[in-house]
Image: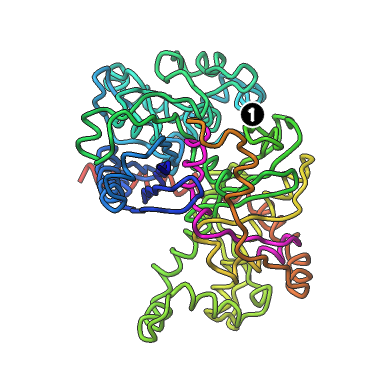
């Protein structure tokens, strides 16, 4: 009888589950969405109950599609998710408030407070990464300061995948991958940071589950969870990983010199490396469990695919109407229009900092910008500049990683962005390396989850060999030399224009925050 694995990925707005056989063939797949909640300026939350409801919906769907025999042969489950999230539960497992997700920027002052108390140098040495308002420490301090009654009732703070794992198994756990990436783990000791606990005035050991490896079996599907999801009770559930790490597995990285990108609403970039890096650099190498890749760099870019969606939502009515009238996919039409513009978009540069930027800037005050608009600018130039601006951001990250000593000989792309050959060719030309797009059956994040689960339960004892056998390249896209020459000339402007504007962008952010605070205050008084 064949064995099967279940991978689940809970993203920022979408959750997806896929049942795979051990050869990587998808047997059943389902997805569902849930909303963002924005209760105030710089505040972005989600309802954990909506996460679980969506998970139940898709699990009932995939088990129904797969049938009784396949469902009974699922040998392991792994869940990945967005990060970080601040989701507090009481001792009975009740959710105390909506989850503050990575997009939430309300705790900027708390971040400054932590850095003042701890010192930036010690923070970076402990976290192995640059501080940013997206991460968990400042969110925890905000929660303690502004909602002290709820904080006092908090038994554990979980990540998004940790909550789904809890609902499946009844066990509150946290994988070490999420622990490291949320910036609460001291990478020097692989334990919750004592210096951070002191700076925050709280014991991280008391509020966070002790971190375990991603492939640790934390529990088994309970009878109650089985009844409502369609799964069989007793299936092993592993600790899981961040969507970033599951994406890395799904890209099939197995050799030094390979880079990977999971290209969706955001982009996640990975580069294998031979050893640890310095800790005081914008992107830091962390230990990796894949044979042949002892360490890897991991870097998130905030709004890559989100930039295209923003354009369609706010400026793209003409493109959407044309696509609808001609029965074509609107993204295919955007690709076509982008190719009608010359490389360099007629001098228009797009800076994709629509939610600030994480790697390599770690800057919450940066904003999205178009520089170079003129009366000659057409819609095709704007569209291509968005493709190019996000590719400039990828180059900025990979150049930063190369400066730390890594090699980038090729880029393997998965996710929705890999379906745009135009975008992939722009990236190949921007980086000067071939881009590999992957077989649709294996290039998805849940497949990375399935690999983790399969390794945990003994179905993939030689992890590196299994990755090479299962993950196939669908297409190889080479750079366009003419485009590459243009991008090499424009890239220095992409870097210098942001640097020259940085202090003004910070002042503008502070001014707008004060204006919004004053406006809200007047609104409450009226």
Q: Which color scheme does this rendered protein use? A: rainbow
User: In the picture, residue 394 is in which quadrant?
Assistant: bottom right
User: In the picture, residue 150 is in which quadrant?
Assistant: top left
- At a point 69% along the width and 34% down the height, the residue shown is 295
Instruction: From this view, report whether residue 431 is shown above or below residue 486.
Output: above
Question: In the shown orientation, is residue 320 left or right of residue 279?
Answer: left
Depth check: 408 or 43 in front?
408
Which residue position holds label 1?
Answer: 128
Return the x and y of residue 455 as percentages of the image width and height: 53, 34
Instruction: From this view, report whether residue 146 is shown above or below residue 37.
Output: above
- At a point 42% along the width and 20% down the height, the residue shown is 208
The answer to whether residue 503 of the structure is visible from this angle is: no
The answer to whether residue 224 of the structure is visible from this angle is: yes
Return the x and y of residue 437 as percentages of the image width and height: 60, 61
Q: Which residues are magenta?
A: 427-455
Question: In the shown orientation, is residue 110 left or right of residue 289?
Answer: left
Asked if residue 443 is among those painted magenta in the image, a careful observer would answer yes
Depth check: 334 or 347 in front?
334
- At a point 28% along the width and 49% down the height, the residue shown is 67
SS at badge 1: loop
């Amino acid at each position: 009888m064949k064995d099967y694995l279940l991978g689940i990925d809970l993203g920022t707005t979408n959750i997806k589950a896929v049942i795979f056989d051990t050869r990587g063939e998808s047997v059943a797949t389902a997805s569902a969405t849930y909303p963002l909640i924005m209760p105030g300026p710089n505040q972005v939350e989600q309802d954990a109950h909506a996460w679980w409801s969506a998970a139940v919906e898709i699990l009932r769907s995939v088990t129904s599609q797969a049938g009784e025999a396949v469902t009974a042969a699922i040998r392991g489950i792994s869940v990945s998710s967005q990060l970080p999230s601040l989701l507090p539960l009481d001792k009975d497992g009740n959710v105390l408030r909506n989850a503050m997700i990575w997009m939430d920027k309300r705790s900027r002052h708390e971040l400054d407070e932590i850095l003042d108390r701890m010192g930036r140098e010690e923070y970076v040495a402990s976290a192995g990464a640059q501080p940013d308002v997206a991460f968990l420490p400042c969110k925890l301090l905000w929660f303690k300061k502004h909602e002290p009654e709820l904080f006092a009732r908090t038994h554990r703070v979980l990540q998004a995948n940790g909550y789904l794992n809890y609902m499946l198994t009844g066990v509150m756990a946290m994988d070490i991958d999420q622990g490291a990436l949320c910036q609460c783990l001291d990478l020097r000791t692989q334990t919750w940071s004592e210096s951070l606990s002191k700076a925050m005035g709280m014991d991280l050991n008391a509020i966070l589950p002790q971190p375990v490896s991603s492939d640790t079996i934390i529990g088994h599907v309970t009878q109650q969870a089985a009844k409502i999801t369609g799964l069989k009770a007793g299936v092993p559930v592993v600790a899981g990983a961040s969507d970033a790490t599951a994406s890395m597995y799904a890209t099939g990285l197995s050799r030094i010199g390979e880079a990977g990108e999971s290209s969706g609403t955001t982009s996640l970039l990975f580069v294998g490396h031979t050893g640890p890096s310095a800790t005081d650099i914008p992107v830091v190498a962390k230990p990796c469990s894949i044979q042949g890749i002892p360490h890897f760099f991991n870097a998130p870019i905030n709004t890559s695919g989100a930039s295209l969606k923003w354009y369609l939502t706010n400026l793209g009515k003409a493109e959407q109407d044309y696509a609808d009238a001609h029965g074509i996919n609107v993204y295919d039409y955007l690709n076509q229009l982008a190719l009608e513009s010359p490389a360099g978009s007629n001098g228009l540069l797009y800076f994709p900092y629509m939610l600030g930027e994480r790697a390599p800037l770690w800057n919450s005050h940066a904003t999205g910008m178009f520089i170079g608009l003129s009366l000659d600018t057409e819609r095709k130039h704007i569209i291509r500049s968005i493709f190019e601006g996000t590719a400039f951001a990828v180059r900025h990250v990979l150049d930063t990683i190369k400066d730390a000593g890594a090699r980038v000989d090729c880029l393997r792309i998965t996710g929705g962005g890999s379906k745009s050959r135009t975008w992939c060719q722009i990236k190949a030309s921007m980086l000067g390396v071939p881009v590999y797009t992957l077989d649709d059956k294996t290039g998805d994040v849940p497949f990375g989850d399935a690999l983790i689960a399969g390794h945990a339960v003994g179905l993939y004892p030689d992890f590196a060999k299994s990755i090479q056998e299962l993950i196939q390249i669908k297409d190889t896209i080479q750079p366009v030399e003419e485009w590459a020459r243009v991008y090499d000339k424009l890239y220095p402007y992409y870097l210098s224009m942001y640097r020259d504007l940085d202090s003004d962008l910070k002042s503008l952010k502070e001014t707008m925050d004060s204006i919004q605070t004053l406006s809200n205050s007047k609104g409450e008084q009226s």
